[in-house]
């Protein structure tokens, strides 16, 4: 797996995958001279965690024959204050499954399997980072 980033002196980067050609922008906050012209790196990390676990949850629910309309994943991270680097200390996930007659126990099981066993992005985090999850079903 490989990603190439091309940057400019104003802290704007384009991240691109040579495998499939997809690209997205990464930028810095105004506090260090950036123009916020893209996701900040720690936002990309949260999005990656949510995307990885979300894909797992969808896959597990489909294999469990759970019919649903949509999955929304909210990911929020707490960081070390006034430190450099400022890593995450806690990451909270809210998995919100939309659909009629969705079995919440199956959603909770899918979330648990993803977070504890299958998600490579979460497995790549420092084990000291606390992971919290909430599972919701919305009709």
Image: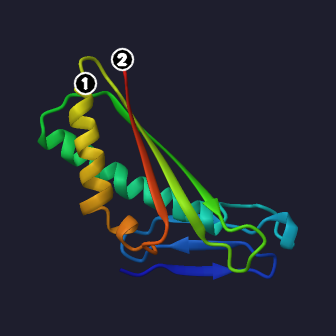
Q: Is residue 105 above or below residue 2?
A: above
Q: Quadrant of the C terminus?
A: top left
* Residue to which mark 2 is pinned: 139
- The residue shown at (24%, 18%) is 101
* Residue to which mark 1 is pinned: 102
- The residue shown at (54%, 59%) is 90
Q: Tag 1, which secondary structure?
A: loop
- The image's mark for residue 44 is none
Q: Tag 2, which secondary structure?
A: loop
Ranked by sequence position, the earlier of labels 2 and 1 is 1
Q: Is residue 40 left or right of residue 121?
A: right
Q: Is residue 60 left or right of residue 94?
A: left
Q: Is residue 36 above or below residue 59?
A: below
Q: Residues within 10 Å of mark 1 (few under 14, many from 20)?
A: some
Q: Could you say where residue 53 lies in the image, as x and y percent from the top left?
A: 35, 54
Identify the image's colour scheme: rainbow, by chain, secondary structure or one colour: rainbow
Where on the picture, by quarter, is residue 71? top left
Q: Could you say where residue 41 lies in the image, as x and y percent from the top left?
A: 62, 69
Q: Quadrant of the N terminus?
A: bottom left
Q: Could you say where residue 28 lies in the image, as x and y percent from the top left?
A: 75, 69
Q: Are marks 2 and 1 in contact (CB under 8 Å)?
A: yes
Q: Is residue 88 above or below residue 107?
A: below
- The residue shown at (47%, 71%) is 128
Where on the picture, by quarter, is residue 114? bottom left
Q: Residues within 10 Å of mark 2 (few under 14, many from 20)?
A: few
Distance, label 2 to label 1, CA atoms, is 8 Å
Q: Is residue 17 left or right of residue 80?
A: left
- The residue shown at (31%, 51%) is 55
In this view of the protein, which residue sits in the foreground, 9 or 42?
42
Q: Could you say where residue 118 lies in the image, as x and y percent from the top left?
A: 25, 61
């Amino acid at each position: 797996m490989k990603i190439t980033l091309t940057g400019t002196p104003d802290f704007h980067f384009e991240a691109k995958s040579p495998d499939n050609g997809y690209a997205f922008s990464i930028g810095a906050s105004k506090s260090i001279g950036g123009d916020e012209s893209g996701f900040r790196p720690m936002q990309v990390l949260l999005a990656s965690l949510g995307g990885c676990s979300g894909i797992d949850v969808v896959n597990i629910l489909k294999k469990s024959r759970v019919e649903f309309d949509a999955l929304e994943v909210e990911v929020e991270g707490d960081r070390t204050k006034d430190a450099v680097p400022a890593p995450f200390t806690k990451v909270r996930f809210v998995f919100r499954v939309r659909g009629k007659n969705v079995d919440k126990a199956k959603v909770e099981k899918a979330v648990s399997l993803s977070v504890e066993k299958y998600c490579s992005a979460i497995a790549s985090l420092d084990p000291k980072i606390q992971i919290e999850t909430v599972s919701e079903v919305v009709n």
